[in-house]
Image (cartoon, rainbow, N blue to C red):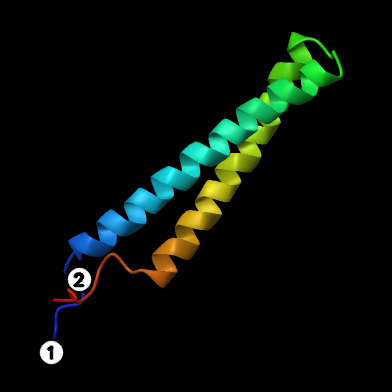
Amino acid sequence: MPNNNRLNPKSLLTVGSAIVLVAVELLCVALAGGWALAGLFQLGTTVEYAFMGIFTLLALWGIVAFSRSALKVEPVFGPDSH
């Protein structure tokens, strides 16, 4: 009977790298989007920071959702694919 609790380093590297890439992209878009919208409509720094905060929360939600989906598709624990 195989041990399914074994760490698969290839899957861990793949999933970890994808999560880091998506996280950086989403956070950069959130911060740049808040800055751009507030600057475009000349709303001031308080609204700019509020937009950045709201968009960052949305980005964090997206990162968590992506992470859960990625770990379902590419399990980190399980048999090594040698």
The structure residue drawn at horizontal position 63% and vertical position 33%, both measured from the top left corner, is: 30
Q: Is residue 31 above or below residue 18?
A: above
Quadrant where the N terminus sits is bottom left
Location of residue 10 in the rendering, given as x and y in whole percent from the top left corner:
22, 62
Q: Dot 2 surroundings within 10 Å: few (below 14), some, or many (20 or more)?
A: few
Q: Residues within 10 Å of mark 1 (few under 14, many from 20)?
A: few
* Kind of residue indicated by mark 1: Met
| For residue 65, above or below residue 36 | below
Residue farthest along the bottom direction in this orientation: 1
The front one of 40 and 7 is 40
Going 67% across and 25% down the picture, which residue do you hit? 52
Left or right, 54 with reference to 4: right
Label 1, secondary structure: give it: loop
Residue 25: where, in percent of width, then height?
A: 52, 39
Q: Quadrant of residue 39?
A: top right
Query: Which residue is found at the position 52% from the left and 48% from the top?
Result: 63
Instruction: Give me the residue at 69% from left, 30% from top.
Output: 33
- Mark 2 → mark 1, Cα distance in angstroms: 12 Å
In the image, residue 16 lies at what x, y percent?
A: 33, 51
Q: Taking 20 as reference, is 52 left or right?
A: right
Amino acid under disc 2: Asn
Residue indicated by mark 2:
5
**What residue would you read off at disc 1?**
1
Question: Where's residue 20, x and y in %?
Answer: 40, 44
Q: Quadrant of residue 21?
A: top left
Q: Does 5 sit left or right of 24 as displayed? A: left
**Quarter of the image where the C terminus is located:** bottom left
Q: Secondary structure at mark 2?
A: loop
The numbered mark at residue 58 is: none
